[in-house]
Structure formats: structure tokens, C-alpha cells
Amino acid sequence: MSRRSLNLDDTLYGYLLDHSLREHPAQAALREATRSQPHAGMQISPEQGQFMAMLVRLMGARRTIEIGVFTGYSALAVALALPADGELLACDISDEYTRVGRPYWEAAGVAHKIALRLAPALDTLDARLAEGAAGHYDFAFIDADKTNYDAYYERCLQLVRQGGLIAIDNVLWGGSVARPAEDASTAAIQALNRKLHRDERIELALVPIGDGLTLARKR
Ligand code: SAM
Ligand code: CA
């Protein structure tokens, strides 16, 4: 029995996928379509999508937010886990990236759950707050530009209900968070990690899945 998380070599990672991955055919097809895109590495891993879907189902989440859609794989994973009347407010600035995903959202029969907002995510989140949506949401996933992570977190903390969950991606940032920061993104993630560790407004878990996923449950 190990006291710490295993390092997954290719063989063990393959075993994990072979023995647990359950994707909708549209998810597998969207991953394949994304593989040839520039920046394909921005997509979350399939087991992380399945984990997030599990969280959404466990919570019985209906109203959700995604900040950073890219080609739509994480949005698809969450949307598939939502009930028929569930909603995902999907925030991105790129029509080029997000248009890749829409046919797969349609193929999976979940496009009606996804409201894509093509604008800086801070504008979309601030507009929702101005509309009185504080406490409206059950779940939020933060995965856009890292230098705005703290601003996204503070908005999401207002937008989710008590007991709601904020999931924050790339919090281990390829391991670079444990070394002196050499760029603004690393410094921003480090600062948020430090802040969350002592943030009394939330319960906290940092899960070493993918590139590190922080779970912050609003008290
Ligand atoms: N969650 C996606 C997935 O798993 O496939 C990956 C998201 S990718 C890491 C980051 C995305 O954030 C890009 O699609 C980019 O266009 C978007 N983005 C960057 N700056 C943004 C901003 N200010 N507002 C909204 N989206 C932004
Ligand atoms: Ca990410």
C-alpha cells in the first residue's frame, strides 16, 4: 500500500483507461477530431472528464458553468451528466476552437443544455452577477487563461450556492508550481494555490488527476 499517489507510466495509464473509461461515442469522436488541432494538449484527459461527470451526478447538479471550452470535450462530459433540463454556461473567446465541438454536442443530444457565450469570461460572469445569479449554480469548472484564475474563482464563489463545487484545472501546471515561477501563469496558479489552502470560505481537496484538479466546496 502506497501512502502517496502513484506515478502512472504508459503501461499503467493504459491499464487505467482499459479498465475504467466509458465514453459516449461522440466523446471518443471529439477527442479524435481534437487530436489534429493545434494546442490539442489543452483538452482534459478522458478519465478526468469521467471524474467530473461523476462529481456532477453525485451532486445532482443542474446548473453549471465552464470557463474555457476549447473544442468542447469537458463541456460534453459535463453536459452528458446533467439531467435533461440541466444547463451549462460555457464561456470562451474563440469561435474557431468552440465550433469544432458543436457537431459532437449535437450528436450526443446535449447541445440544448449548453449555452455558449463567446466573450471574455469575466464579462459573462459579471453580467450573470448583475442579473442576480449569485447562488444560482451548483458546479463551476475553471480552465481558461491562468492569470485570471483568481478573478474567475472569486466570481464563481459568488455564483455557486452553498455546498456548490468549483473545480480548478492545471493546479500542478506540469510540476512547475513547485519551483520558482518563471512566468505569469505559473505565478498566478501558485498564488491561487496558496490562497485556497487557507481560504475559510471553502472545503478543499487537490486531486492529482491530469495536470492537477482542485476541488473547492463552498461552505
Ligand atoms: N476545458 C477545455 C477542454 O478540456 O477541452 C480546455 C480549455 S483550454 C485549456 C483554455 C480555453 O480558454 C481556450 O479555448 C481559450 O480560447 C479560452 N480563453 C482564454 N482566455 C479567455 C478569456 N479571457 N475568456 C474566456 N475564455 C478564454
Ligand atoms: Ca486544462
Image (cartoon, rainbow, N blue to C red):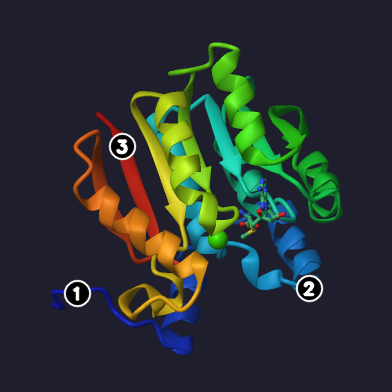
Q: Where does residue 170 sit, x and y in percent of width and height?
A: 47, 63
**Real-space CA distance between mark 2 and mark 1, rounded to the nearest whole angstrom:** 34 Å
Give the quarter the ligand 2 occupies: bottom right
Q: x, y (%) of residue 117?
A: 74, 34
Mark 3 lies on a secondary structure that is strand
Density class for disc 3 (Cα within 10 Å; few <14, some 14-19, many ≥20) is many
Vertical arrangement, residue 95 with respect to residue 122, above or below:
below
Q: Amino acid at mark 3?
A: Arg
The amino acid on which the numbered mark 1 sits, given as a three-letter code, is Arg
| Sequence-first disc among 2 and 1 | 1
Compare residues 39 and 104 and report the one nearer the observer: 39
The C terminus is located in which quarter? top left
Q: Label 2's element?
A: loop
Nearer to me, 28 or 169: 169
Residue 92 falls left or right of residue 160: right
- Work out how far the residue at label 3 is from the one at label 2, CA to CA, in angstroms: 34 Å
Occupied quadrant, residue 43: bottom right
| Disc 1: which residue | 4
Which of the labelled discs sits on residue 14, or is there none? none
Marks 2 and 1 close (CB-CB < 8 Å): no
Query: Which x, y percent locates residue 175?
Result: 39, 78
Cα–Cα gap, marks 3 and 1:
23 Å
Residue that label 3 marks: 217
The disc label shown at residue 38, or none: 2
Question: What residue is drawn where x is 71% and y is 70%?
Answer: 40
